[in-house]
Image (cartoon, grey):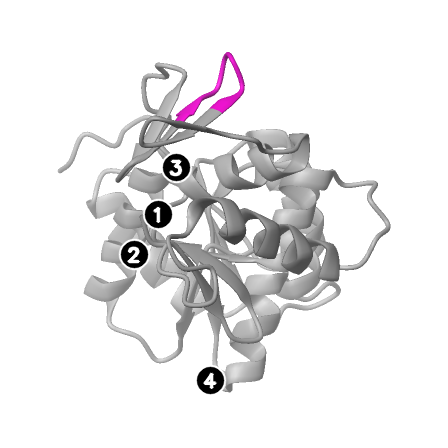
């Protein structure tokens, strides 16, 4: 038994056998588990119960997992792991663009799933805020909204600063263009994801030693970007 008594996991899965198997194994790990068998019920439980993590099947009755994920990402800041029997790259891209934090294909090893649950929860655990983010020789002062590269004060626009904050806070994670639009520009922004690409280019010109061969902000083809450090 681990010390996860206060950690709530919502499993949204219409296959009763798999749902029960997941619930049993998660409870053995010490998590409190809630379940739902269709999209609308899963959506309602996520809204009312505020789980710490959601395991979400894509092929659900009434409302599919992609749709549930997109809706929840607009409302909640909670890790979402998608489950699917489809393994195509397109489905993975759609899942990540829908706002999922991770993606696992059926059939899967329960040990791997539990490891991904633990990793997702670690990433989402709030850390004591000092108002400072550092990576290599980059230094962000969140309170003063100042960015430094070594001793050099960088002249960043408002959105460039917020974009760099989001990237550095999620170092090593792939962030889709749509997710960055939502986080930096807001849910009601109606512009194109190309805006993200333009601001990434401007950021690279200011933080990369060689902007034409970036090493800090990696482009993940057809998905988005990852901050390497």
In what element is the residue under mark 4? loop
Mark-to-mark CA distance, 3 and 1: 6 Å
What are the residue bounds of the magenta stretch?
Answer: 140-146
Mark-to-mark CA distance, 4 and 2: 17 Å
Mark 3 Cα-neighbour bin, 10 Å: few <14, some 14–19, many ≥20 = some
Residue ID for mark 4: 87
Task: Check the image and name the residue furthest to the bottom.
Answer: 88
Mark 4 Cα-neighbour bin, 10 Å: few <14, some 14–19, many ≥20 = few
Q: Position of residue 187 (x, y in %)?
A: 76, 41
Q: Residue 213 falls in which quadrant of the image?
A: bottom left
Residue ID for mark 1: 120
Mark-to-mark CA distance, 4 and 1: 21 Å
Residue ID for mark 3: 124
Mark-to-mark CA distance, 1 and 2: 6 Å
Q: Position of residue 129 (x, y in %)?
A: 37, 17
Q: Earlier in the sequence, mark 4 or mark 2?
A: 4
Q: Is residue 42 visible?
A: no
Residue ID for mark 2: 116
Question: In this rendering, is residue 96 above or below 34?
Answer: below
Q: Position of residue 115 (x, y in %)?
A: 23, 56
């Amino acid at each position: 038994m681990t010390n996860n008594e206060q950690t709530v996991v919502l499993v949204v899965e219409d296959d009763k056998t798999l749902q029960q198997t997941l619930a049993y194994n998660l409870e053995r790990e010490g998590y409190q588990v809630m379940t739902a068998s269709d999209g609308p019920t899963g959506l309602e439980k996520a809204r009312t119960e505020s789980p710490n993590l959601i395991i979400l099947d894509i092929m659900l009755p009434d409302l599919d997992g992609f749709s549930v994920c997109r809706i929840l990402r607009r409302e909640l800041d909670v890790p979402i792991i998608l489950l699917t029997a489809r393994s195509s790259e397109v489905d993975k891209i759609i899942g990540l663009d829908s706002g999922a934090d991770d993606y696992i294909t059926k059939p899967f090893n329960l040990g791997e799933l539990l490891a991904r649950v633990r990793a997702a929860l670690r990433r989402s655990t709030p850390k004591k805020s000092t108002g400072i983010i550092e990576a290599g020789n980059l230094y962000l002062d969140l309170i003063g909204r100042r960015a430094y590269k070594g001793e050099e004060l960088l002249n960043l626009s408002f959105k460039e600063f917020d974009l760099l904050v989001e990237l550095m806070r999620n170092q090593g994670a792939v962030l889709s263009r749509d997710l960055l639009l939502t986080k930096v520009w807001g849910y009601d922004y109606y512009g194109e994801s190309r805006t993200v690409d333009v601001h990434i280019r401007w950021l690279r010109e200011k933080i990369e030693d060689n902007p034409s061969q970036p090493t800090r902000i990696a482009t993940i083809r057809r998905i988005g970007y990852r901050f390497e450090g």
